[in-house]
Amino acid sequence: MDRSREIADAIVTHYQSVKRDLPWRRTRDPYAIWVSEIMLQQTRVATVIPYWERWMAKFPTVATLAAAPLDDVLAVWAGLGYYSRARNLHAGAKVVGDALPRTASELRGVPGIGPYTAGAIASIAYGERAPLVDGNVSRVLARVFAIEDDVKSTKGTKALWIRAGALMTALAPAAEPGELNQGLMELGATICTPTSPRCLVCPLAALCAAKRLGRQDELPVMPARKKQEDLPLLARTHVWIQFDDEIVVGRRPAEGLFGGLWELPDLDAAKRLGVTIDREPVAFLSQILTHRRLDVTVVRGRGLARDADPGYEAIRRIRIADVETLGVAAVTVAILRKYQDSPWTSIPRPSLSSPRATRRSSKASAFSASTSKTTTSPTRPRARRKASTSLSTIKHRPRPR
DNA sequence: GTCCAGGTTA
DNA sequence: TAACCTGGAC
């Protein structure tokens, strides 16, 4: 028995003994698997489960998804990030018609389905012997076969796909291709972890080149990552325009950053809408994105002379309590949390009376996001940056001046 | 606090 | 090759 065959069989055997009962593993509906694969690309299993359940309840078939407005799609996706994936899933549903293509190579042509997702759907839903490579698989294969190339490079990627394909070819005839793929990913997620791989309990230990060479801590070779400090800063001001229990929100253009999501109008838009802008901000937030640091300032505004702005696809009012039923990004949710925690409208605005320290409630930590920092200073963050613990713990303090 | 993971598209 | 988001790990 050759080595690839031994490795493939060991992976499947191991997978069968440890596989978890996840909702999308109870079906071979290619659409359901497609949705789960897209969600899982960027999020932990525990987070995906409720999103997947809500999604499948709302859009149970590819036809219902295709028929839904993008706005509804983004609302269900809101909070998962990488919103282009939801947009692509929606676009994909529109092009496939009643049913998904039946092979990996045809699946590859659907918007949002790249090499990984094509392999996942084809192998899991259709039982095709289609390989796949994701981050977990890269790590496992780079170690098992001691691949020294940067796994993100063209050369490394090619080597990984060749290895994954060879394993699939070598797999026992009666075995399920989907189980090999899922077994590889499971191994990477639970045993062959980025740091401190648990080689002692690994079913591939005896077959692993990195283990034999003692190089499991050096592999895979990953490309250097940019430090957060070096990311370009994107500073934006959003305007809180409230009428009774409603606020004004705008829908961003469909493409690009936070595409299609609703947010508080930015400063330029608010001005064009005839809004009078307060001088003093009520909150600062910051968030690290892949390619940028995002600093958000929130300021109140009053009045709304117009209800359309070229910068937004739509402008509308909505009850504050209902904003989260729209597609909104995490930073917008954080602004709402902060407001609900200690509403700035309750502060007597024109008065220059004594300052009030605000306290955050303990429940704020339930929405912690450790990539996010907040500032307490009402001056530009440049002057005094004081890190807090989460996106939701923005403190605001009307300055006595 | 900081770092890190993670596929597809243009 | 760069853009794209969030939250869990350390």
Image: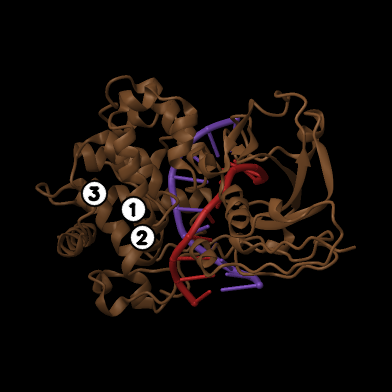
Chain colours: A brown, B purple, C red
Which residue position holds label 2? A141
At mark 2, the secondary structure is: helix
Q: CA distance from mark 3 to mark 1?
A: 30 Å
- In primary-sequence order, the first of circles 2 and 3 is 3
- Residue A23 tag number: 3
Left or right for A160, reference A385? left
- The one of A314 and A211 positioned closer to us in this rendering: A314
Tell me if residue A226 comes above or below residue A83 in the rendering: below
Which circle marks residue A163 in the picture?
1
Labels 2 and 1 positioned on one and the same chain: yes
Chain ID for label 2? A
Type of amino acid under label 3:
Pro
Name which residue type carries label 2: Leu
Residue at image x 63%, y 52%? A335
The answer to whether one can see residue A228 in this image is yes
Category of crowding for the residue at label 1, using alpha-carbon neighbours closer than 10 angstroms: few (below 14), some (14–19), many (at least 20): many
- Which quarter shows the N terminus of chain A? bottom left
Q: Position of residue A351 (x, y in %)?
A: 85, 56
Residue A26 x/y as whole percent:
18, 46
Image quarter in which the C terminus of chain A is found: bottom right
Q: CA distance from mark 2 to mark 1?
A: 7 Å
The residue most toward the right is A401
Q: Can you tell which quarter of the image residue A209 is in?
A: bottom left
| Left/right of residue A24 with respect to residue A280 in the rendered view | left
The chain identifier of the residue carrying mark 3 reads A
The disc, 3 or 1, on the residue closer to the chain's N-terminal end is 3
Picture quarter containing residue A34?
Answer: top left
Pointer 2 with pointer 1, Cβ within 8 A: yes
Q: Are marks 3 and 1 on the same chain?
A: yes
| Local secondary structure at mark 1 | helix
Chain to which mark 1 belongs? A
